[in-house]
Amino acid sequence: MTQAPVRTDTDILATAREQVLDRGVGLDEQQTLEVLRLGDERLEELLELAHEVRMRWCGPEVEVEGIISLKTGGCPEDCHFCSQSGLFQSPVRAAWLDIPSLVEAAKQTAKTGATEFCIVAAVRGPDERLMAQVAAGVEAIRNEVDIQVACSLGMLTQEQVDQLAAMGVHRYNHNLETSRSHFPNVVTTHSWEERWDTLRMVREAGMEVCCGGILGMGETLEQRAEFAANLAELEPDEVPLNFLNPRPGTPFGDLEVLPAADALRAVAAFRLALPRTMLRFAGGREITLGDLGAKKGILGGINAVIVGNYLTTLGRPAEADLDLLGELKMPIKALNETI
Ligand code: SF4
């Protein structure tokens, strides 16, 4: 009697197909690293698998979100990628937006079909003035516009978390930015753990957690895989993925832009590590991926986009993204499905 051949096929994509696509179990850190190390000749195959995983575990809908900056620039922190830090020679001056402009931006955002409107402030954490502005802004938007409100206001105290939850803030964004081991090379004015604490409080208060970061900040592939594992442990509802757009005058101003193949490989790897999460293309993709990138990413694991302008750099116009979703026959997630 001949013995059955010993199975030697340990190809990571075959493993991912069975584990992630069939069973919905995300790749662990080591497996994610194997995916990040795949050669360019496997990229198409990887993107197709990531797309299948996204369709199976998230469905075809794409969530559209708009963001607005309530307070821009002049931040006391030293995140090395950020042109809004007041510690670098950066072009972004401190400025505040008034409430009528905020409401108008929410209206324009809702017109695009977006279901989420995120109010962002460049701060370490909110002070009383900012909390009062946010409270007034959220109330005005809720009275006049049919859209869910998210906030991104830096690190929070428990009291502030409770206040935001009481205002009806639906989702809170706070990025870990990079892996725990790389974080001290990126930020020195606060710790990764402080960020983690805010995220834990947000989750416990019942708000949705939005947490992602920036790829291409000098992290190794091991650290990129570590970051995916950090996020998998947190289990955020949404992960915005940014690619470093090196801003002149910041400490990371001279870093190389992440090559397109690496960026797409990372998107797919994060999808395989986080099969059920909403994975959003955020800033920097135009410079990393060019015009074709949006399409490739949306067919390679992405299922959420930001419309219009990013915070400090111009994104693509809303229409371009919305046209693309129409072309790909991917419906925009409707508001009533998200409540
Ligand atoms: S990333 Fe946020 S906390 Fe860091 S410097 Fe920029 S605005 Fe400040």
Image (cartoon, rainbow, N blue to C red):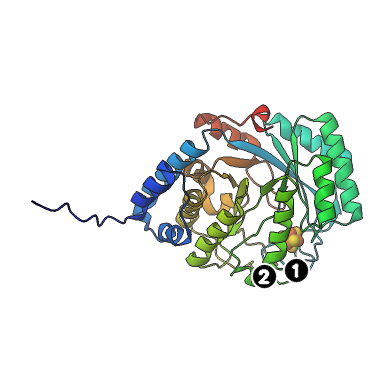
How far apart are the alpha carbons under marks 1 and 2? 8 Å
Which residue appears at 73% of the width and 48% of the height? 172
Mark 2 CB near ligand 1 (8 Å cut) = no
Rendering quadrant holding ligand 1:
bottom right
User: Is residue 257 depicted above or below 336 in this figure?
Assistant: below
Q: List x then y, in percent, for residue 149.
A: 76, 39
**155 sits left or right of 23 in the view:** right
The answer to which of marks 1 and 2 sits earlier in the sequence is 1
Q: List x then y, in percent, for residue 202.
A: 73, 51
Residue topped by disc 2: 251
Quarter holding the C terminus is top right
Q: Residue furthest front?
A: 1
Q: List x then y, in percent, for residue 282.
A: 62, 48
Which residue appears at 80% of the width and 44% of the height? 165
> Marks 2 and 1: in contact by CB < 8 Å?
yes
Q: What amino acid does circle 1 point to?
A: Phe
Q: Is residue 84 visible?
A: no
User: Is residue 154 depicted above or below 317 in this figure?
Assistant: below
User: Which image quarter: residue 138?
Assistant: top right
Tell which of 288 and 187 is nearer to you: 187
Per the image, label 2 sits on a secondary structure element best described as: loop
Residue topped by disc 1: 88
Q: What amino acid does circle 2 point to?
A: Pro
Labelled disc at residue 170: none
**128 sits left or right of 265 in the view:** right
**238 sits left or right of 260 in the view:** right
